[in-house]
Image (tube, grey):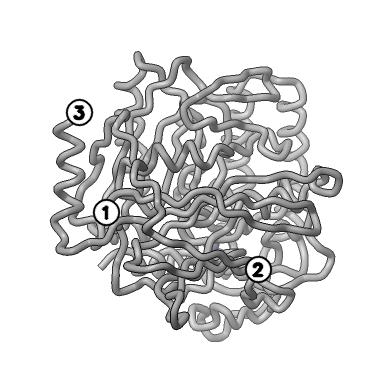
Amino acid sequence: MRVVWFLVMAVCASAASVPRTLRVDLYHAGTASAEDFALDEVLIEGPWPGRLDRTVDDTNLGSYRFEVREAKDHHLLYSRGYSSIFAEWQTTDEAKQTRRTYSESVRFPEPDTAVLLTIQKRNAQNRFVDLWSTAVDPKTANRSAGSKQYRVWPVIHHGAPPDKVDLLLLGDGYSRLEMAKWHRDAARFAAMLFTQSPFKERRASFNVWAIDTPAEESGVSIPSDGIWRRSPLRTSYDAFGIERYALAFDNKRLRDIAAAAPYEFIEIIMNSRKYGGGGIFNLFATVAADNEQSGYIFVHEFGHHFAGLADEYYTSDVAYGKTAEHPEPWEPNATVDPHAAKWSDLITPGTPLPTPWPKAEYEAAEKKIQERRRAIRGAHADEAEMDALFAEEARTVLPLLDEGPYGHVAGAFEGADYYGSGYYRPEENCIMFTRAVKRGFCAVCRRGIARVIDLYAR
Ligand SMILES: [Zn+2]
């Protein structure tokens, strides 16, 4: 156990004069129409795992952004876009009647002196505006972060963390007796990611780490099935009342565990067979380990978490209400522009815009699938019934999206981001649209992912 910890520290220390990681824990509270932040705790974690020459975020991703400026002259030291559980909760019905708070963290290289931390949010024109600021003095930080209680081990190691994307895998709901299964699952999911472009081609740009977090009891909470667990990461299905949506709400707990490893991205692998997962940009993603669709769920949700990709689908139940007006999404792979100026350089000249596709046929077939999906969940049927339905969908519905002259080119295909009209996606099919794990990411999603890899790997 100790040997592995020293390996992690030695790998981190190998890059000369790497600063520590400063973490600021915040409370993000409010209602559907109001929000505010409050400072909770300032902590020092392990060596900073990121590039020191890409401290300012130029990707313009996320619903929020944080900026770290020198207190004396407001010189910008660090910034990153991110999305939050609070922002998703804000669009639920509960937020219209209840005031709630969620814990959030921002992490940046430890500065030499006091800094000003500002949280920004997008306005109606999608530009970031200041929402809240606080002074942060590293001298006051809690230096006990980074639990040595759990074992850290490298799943895939390609170099010093500052030169690589550091992905951390955390297992939730694996009992002590299931640690061998956890190790197999961690290796299996890491391998799965690198079967997908552009991760496949950029494999050497990644380290993948894992932490063993043995649970008292096997499994995670599934409230709609009456299953409750106090699992190490507190991951739970039924987030915001959506059965398949699984999130870890105890941010401080998650961060304290994660602090033992170098990381920029977190994938929580739930020891569960039930279809489900989730992914929030620059926060974490979750996936059920043992579902027949686990490969798809993992890659799709990781697309949200890693590159801020939008859902390209619009036929499934989602947690959030959307506003009636149609603003241009900040996500790289959805647009309100029927000529898709956002990705026009990837469109072959002569492709009609918007681009024709068998929309009516697809929607009619998909409507029946969704009805049966709801019936299976309503009856609390065996998971095998859901597996069979998705297999049937793959055989009967998905081939519609491969046919025709535009089945495999970039264009502007109407239907994306939970809307059947007014929003366009880049290709007829993509793993952000359907469970098309063999098809993978479309060209626009691949480009979005590559940009984020470059932000963290040299
Ligand atoms: Zn896509």
**Residue pointed to by mark 2:** 131
User: How far, Cα to Cα, is label 3 from label 2?
Assistant: 43 Å
* Quadrant in the rendering for residue 322: bottom right
- The image shows residue 23 at horizontal and vertical percentages of 43, 53
Residue 78 visible? The answer is yes
Q: Which mark is residue 419?
A: none
Is residue 425 among what the camera can see?
Answer: no
Q: Residues within 10 Å of mark 2 (few under 14, many from 20)?
A: some
Residue at image coords 78%, 52%: 31
The picture quadrant where one finds residue 75 is bottom left
Question: Which quarter shows the N terminus?
Answer: top left
Where residue 210 appears, as percent x and y from the top left, is 31, 38
Answer few, some or many: residues within 10 Å of disc 1's Cα (few below 14, many 20 plus, some between 14 and 19).
many
What is the secondary structure assignment of the residue under circle 2? strand
Q: Amino acid at mark 1?
A: Pro
Q: Assign a secondary structure to mark 1.
A: strand
Do the numbered discs 2 and 1 sit on residues whose CB atoms are within 8 Å?
no
Q: Which residue is at the front of the view, 115 or 263?
A: 115
Q: Earlier in the sequence, mark 3 or mark 1?
A: 3
Q: Position of residue 355 (x, y in %)?
A: 65, 73
**Where is mark 3, residue-wise?**
1
Vertical order, 174 against 25 (above or below): above
Disc number placed over residue 47 in the picture, else none: 1
452 lies above or below 97: below
Quadrant of res 427: bottom right
Q: Is residue 206 above or below residue 384?
A: below
Separation of disc 2 and disc 1 at Cα? 29 Å
Residue type at the position of mark 2: Leu
For the point 67% across and 65% down, the residue is 357
Name the amino acid type tagged 3. Answer: Met
